Amino acid sequence: GRTNEKQTYWGGARPGVRQCACGLEGNCADAKHLCNCDAGGETWTSDSGLLSYKDHLPVTRIHIGDINRTNSEAAY
């Protein structure tokens, strides 16, 4: 974004919460995690939502981590 600061939330969540929308809503695929992408199950899961906090736009980079687990992959 304009401030070039690292953000730790994803679409549908508020800045600073370190989770995805499903974590806020309490409906993630695995209740032990705050994002569906961390569930690590056999079925592909995803996290989506709008990034709408204007001071954090435009998104200029995305860092996807923790994809070295068995059956773990990422797409954006």
Image (cartoon, rainbow, N blue to C red):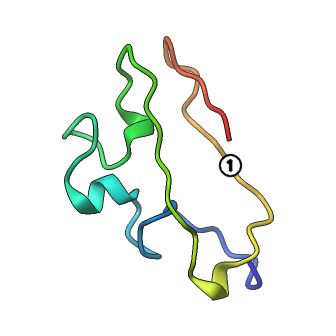
Q: Position of residue 56 (x, y in %)?
A: 65, 79
Residue 45 coordinates in the image, percent (x, y): 43, 31
The answer to whether 16 appears left or right of 59 in the picture is: left
Q: In screen coordinates, is 60 left or right of 40?
A: right
Residue positioned 57% across, 77% down in the render = 52
Q: Residues within 10 Å of mark 1 (few under 14, many from 20)?
A: few
- Residue underneath mark 1: 63
Which quadrant of the structure image shows residue 16? Answer: bottom left
How many marks do you count on the picture? 1
At 64% from the left and 86% from the top, the residue drawn is 54
Q: For numbered disc 1, what is the local secondary structure?
A: loop
Residue 5 vertical position relative to residue 31 in the rendered view, above or below: below
Q: Examine the image and state in which quarter residue 24 appears.
A: bottom left
Q: Residue shown at 38%/24% (left/top)?
A: 40
- In the rendered view, does 6 fall on the left or right side of 59? left
Position of residue 70 relative to residue 64, above or below, is above
Residue 10, x across and y down, in percent: 51, 60
Question: In what quadrant of the picture does the N terminus appear?
Answer: bottom right
**Viewport quadrant of the C terminus:** top right
Amino acid of disc 1:
His
> In the drawing, does residue 31 fall left or right of residue 69?
left
Residue at x 68%, y 75% (from the top left corner): 5
Please, which residue is most extreme toward the right here?
60
